[in-house]
């Protein structure tokens, strides 16, 4: 578990040709982290393996986005999403994540694999604004579950107005 760390407001970047890779079990416990992940997140391998992937969750990320992500991959589907993560020291970094389930020979989900690339900066500005609105909606509710449900309704409304699925939305953002 990460000790309490406050966001620094400092953004970290990684190179266009680098890919952040991690693997988890079905509960989100990290089983693999590549060197790019370790460098940008500021952890050593022995500090990150066995930890829940939410160790890098930035408090600016709305719960409803992760709820959508987890429901999608738990249903056996892949998802693409913009995510703001937090390094061990409180710095943040944006990624364009592609998360996929890993299946065993009988078709059962046995874990998840995530590749994260450098995001489009124009899209980050758009997503950051949307995420602030979603987080504000979530925080209007005293119960986090009610807040997450309200955020989910807000995301669904945005997608319905745009006439896009979440994946189409992720690729259409500019």
Image (cartoon, rainbow, N blue to C red):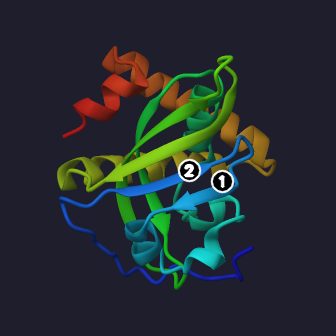
92 sits to left or right of 126: right
What percent of the width, then of the height, locates residue 170?
Answer: 33, 34
Question: Which of these two is toward me, 54 or 64?
Answer: 54
Q: Above or below — where is 57 with respect to 150? A: below
Find numbered disc 2 in the image and state the secondary structure of the residue it sits on.
strand
Q: Residues within 10 Å of mark 1 (few under 14, many from 20)?
A: some
- Residue drawn at point x = 52 percent, y = 85 percent: 89
- Residue drawn at point x = 70 percent, y = 59 percent: 52
**Quadrant where the image shows the C terminus:** top left
Mark 1 or 2, nearer chain start: 2
- Residue drawn at point x = 57 percent, y = 27 percent: 72
Question: Which of these two is toward me, 48 or 91?
Answer: 48
- Residue drawn at point x = 65 percent, y = 67 percent: 49
Q: Above or below — where is 100 with respect to 31? A: above
What percent of the width, then of the height, locates residue 19?
Answer: 32, 56
Calculate the distance from the C-alpha at mark 1 to the C-alpha at mark 2.
30 Å
Q: Which residue is mark 1?
A: 139
Residue 80 shows in the view: yes
Q: Which residue is mark 2?
A: 23
What percent of the width, then of the height, locates residue 132?
Answer: 46, 54
Residue 151 shows in the view: no
Q: Above or below — where is 26 with respect to 125? A: above
Q: Above or below — where is 77 with respect to 2? A: above
Find numbered disc 1 in the image and state the secondary structure of the residue it sits on.
helix
What percent of the width, then of the height, locates residue 126?
Answer: 28, 47
14 sits to left or right of 133: left
Q: Residues within 10 Å of mark 2 (few under 14, many from 20)?
A: many
């Amino acid at each position: 578990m990460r000790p309490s760390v406050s966001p620094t407001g400092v953004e970290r970047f990684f190179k266009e040709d680098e890919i952040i890779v991690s693997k988890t079990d079905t509960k989100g416990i990290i089983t693999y982290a590549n060197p790019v992940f370790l460098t940008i997140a500021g952890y050593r391998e022995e500090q990150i393996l066995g930890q829940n992937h939410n160790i890098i969750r930035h408090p600016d990320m709305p719960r409803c986005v992760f709820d959508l992500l987890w429901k999608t991959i738990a249903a056996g589907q892949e998802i693409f999403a913009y995510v703001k993560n937090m390094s061990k020291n409180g710095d943040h970094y944006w990624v364009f994540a592609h998360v996929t389930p890993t299946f065993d020979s009988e078709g059962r989900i046995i874990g998840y694999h995530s590749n994260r690339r450098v995001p489009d900066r124009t899209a980050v500005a758009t997503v950051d604004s949307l995420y602030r609105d979603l987080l504000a909606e979530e925080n209007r509710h005293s119960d986090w579950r009610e807040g997450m449900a309200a955020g989910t309704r807000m995301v669904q409304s945005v997608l319905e107005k745009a006439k896009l699925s979440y994946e189409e939305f992720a690729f259409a953002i500019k």
